[in-house]
Amino acid sequence: MKIASEIRKIIEYGTKAPSGHNTQPWKFTFSENEIQIHPDFERALPIVDPDNHALYISLGCSAENIILASRNIGYNADLLYIIDAADDSSCVNLEARHSNYINIDCKTQRVQLRSR
């Protein structure tokens, strides 16, 4: 199915987002026109990030990558934060619709620019 393969490609860009200590603290679920990013608390760092602040920033970075990748593939992603403080089941919901955005060149590989 074309849509499922496009959504998997969009999610792949989401996984390339920066995250605190490169923990990649996210889990993705998707349906035909929706991607949800859930926090993966098994990857939390309670010593350096006791309130999961950096973890949630990482989710935002992933969401931004997904929005940019969606535009590149021809979708517009509407962002919705679903917050449930009672049980930490918050997630980021992105709903995709076809769009007429101009394609941009998305990088598919991470590049490290550190000097030795």
Image (cartoon, rainbow, N blue to C red):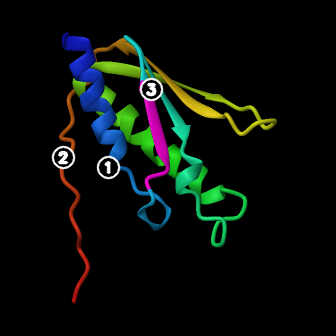
Would residue 25 be counted in the magenta stretch? yes
Would residue 96 be counted in the magenta stretch? no
Residue for point 44% across, 26% down: 29
Residue for point 18% across, 53% down: 109
Asked if residue 11 is positioned above or below residue 31 in the image, the reply reads below
In the rendered structure, the answer to whether residue 111 lies left or right of residue 66 reads left
Secondary structure category for the residue under label 3: strand
Quadrant for the C terminus, please.
bottom left
Secondary structure category for the residue under label 1: loop
Residue for point 45% across, 59% down: 23
Type of amino acid under label 3: Thr
Circle on res. 108: 2
Using a 10 Å C-alpha cutoff, classify the residue at mark 1 as few (fewer than 14 neighbours), some (14 to 19) or many (20 or more).
some
Q: Nearer the viewer, mark 3 or mark 2?
A: 3
At which x and y percent is residue 65?
A: 37, 41
Over which residues does the magenta segment extend? Answer: 24-29
Asked if residue 58 is positioned above or below residue 38 in the image, the reply reads below
The reply to whether the C-beta atoms of the residues labelled 2 and 1 are less than 8 Å apart is yes
Quadrant for the N terminus, please.
top left
Residue that badge 1 annotates: 16
In the rendered structure, the answer to whether residue 11 lies left or right of residue 35 reads left
Circle on res. 103: none
The reply to whether the C-beta atoms of the residues labelled 1 and 3 are less than 8 Å apart is no
Q: Residue furthest front?
A: 42
Q: Quadrant of residue 99?
A: top left
At which x and y percent is residue 40?
A: 54, 45
Name which of mark 2 and mark 1 comes first in the sequence: 1
Q: Nearer the viewer, mark 1 or mark 3?
A: 3
Residue that badge 3 annotates: 29
